[in-house]
Image: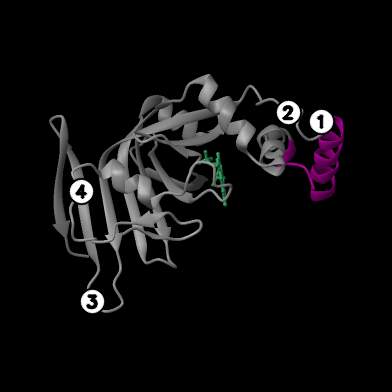
Amino acid sequence: MITSTQTFGTDQADPDETLADPMELLGLWLPENADELRPLMTLSTVDADGYPDSRNVLLSEFDGEALYFHTDARSRKAGELATNPRVALAFVWIELGRQLTVVGDAAPATPEEAAAAFAARSRYLQLLAWRNGADLAGLGLAARRAAWVAFAAEHPEGTLEPPPTWTGFRVVPRRVTFWRGDPDGPSNRVEYTRSGGGWEAVRLPG
Ligand SMILES: Cc1cc2nc3c(=O)[nH]c(=O)nc-3n(C[C@H](O)[C@H](O)[C@H](O)COP(=O)(O)O)c2cc1C
């Protein structure tokens, strides 16, 4: 039996059963792509000096093999990914006592996928993709809001295409770690690492 929650995905009935393919478990833990409430994940990249760099982004989609996020092509993260595609992702569902961490490689998503992700974004997030650049960042609050309101008035709901700077990345996992809390016992982690054509799983403390 699978236990279900409305927006935080589902879980295995028996968490001690090690599934052969962690993508199956990812599919249970992540919400449906059609769910408007997208999970937030901490995305870590590596900068030119080798320092990790983290920020939170929305998970746009999971296609059974890769996790997608979308951003501005002029952003620091996009610049870092152009020279080093290695990333880490971290999700936490505090209410469920679950953490999911992923290490993998990011590659550009197709224009079709990016366009579909833009179409699925809320009106506010579509406006943000258009009007959140360096030209407004240095203005005062009143000027920023005036530019926003004017842009929104010129572009009624449903008319916005993705801006040229809209870009998507698909992250293919090489390591996936599922952490479950247990109020009546120790937490438990199961970690999957790609090995040959399949996955190796190990149970870990902590
Ligand atoms: C709740 C929340 C959701 C966010 N979602 C995104 C997102 O999906 N894509 C994105 O590029 N930035 C998103 N941001 C902003 C990023 O955290 C970050 O500030 C921005 O992308 C610039 O990052 P960079 O300079 O490291 O590239 C979000 C921030 C918050 C707080």
Residue 153 is one of the magenta-drawn residues: yes
Q: Residue at x 79, y 47 (%)?
A: 140
Residue 153 in sight from this viewpoint: yes
As measured in the structure, the alpha-carbon distance from the residue carrying label 4 to the one carrying label 2 is 42 Å
Q: Secondary structure at mark 2?
A: loop
Is 63 placed above or below 44 here? above
Residue 160 is labelled as 2
Residue for badge 3 = 185
Q: Are marks 1 and 3 in contact (CB under 8 Å)?
A: no
Residue 105 image point, x, y percent: 33, 32
As measured in the structure, the alpha-carbon distance from the residue carrying label 2 to the one carrying label 3 is 51 Å
Local packing at callout 2 (Cα closer than 10 Å; few below 14, some 14-19, many 20+) is: some
Residue 74 in sight from this viewpoint: no
Q: Which mark is in front, 4 or 3?
A: 4
Is 160 left, or right, of 19 in this rendering?
right
Residue 155 is labelled as 1
Residue 135 image point, x, y percent: 73, 33
Is 185 left, or right, of 80 in this rendering?
left
As measured in the structure, the alpha-carbon distance from the residue carrying label 1 to the one carrying label 2 is 7 Å
- Region of the chain picked out in magenta, as a range: 136-155
Q: Furthest residue to the front?
A: 1
**Where does the N terminus fall, quadrant-wise?**
bottom left
Q: Nearer the viewer, residue 140 or 176?
A: 176
Q: Which mark is in front, 1 or 3?
A: 3
Residue 139 is one of the magenta-drawn residues: yes
As measured in the structure, the alpha-carbon distance from the residue carrying label 4 to the one carrying label 1 is 48 Å
Q: Are marks 2 and 3 in contact (CB under 8 Å)?
A: no
Q: Earlier in the sequence, mark 4 or mark 2?
A: 4
Residue for badge 4 = 19
Local packing at callout 3 (Cα closer than 10 Å; few below 14, some 14-19, many 20+) is: few
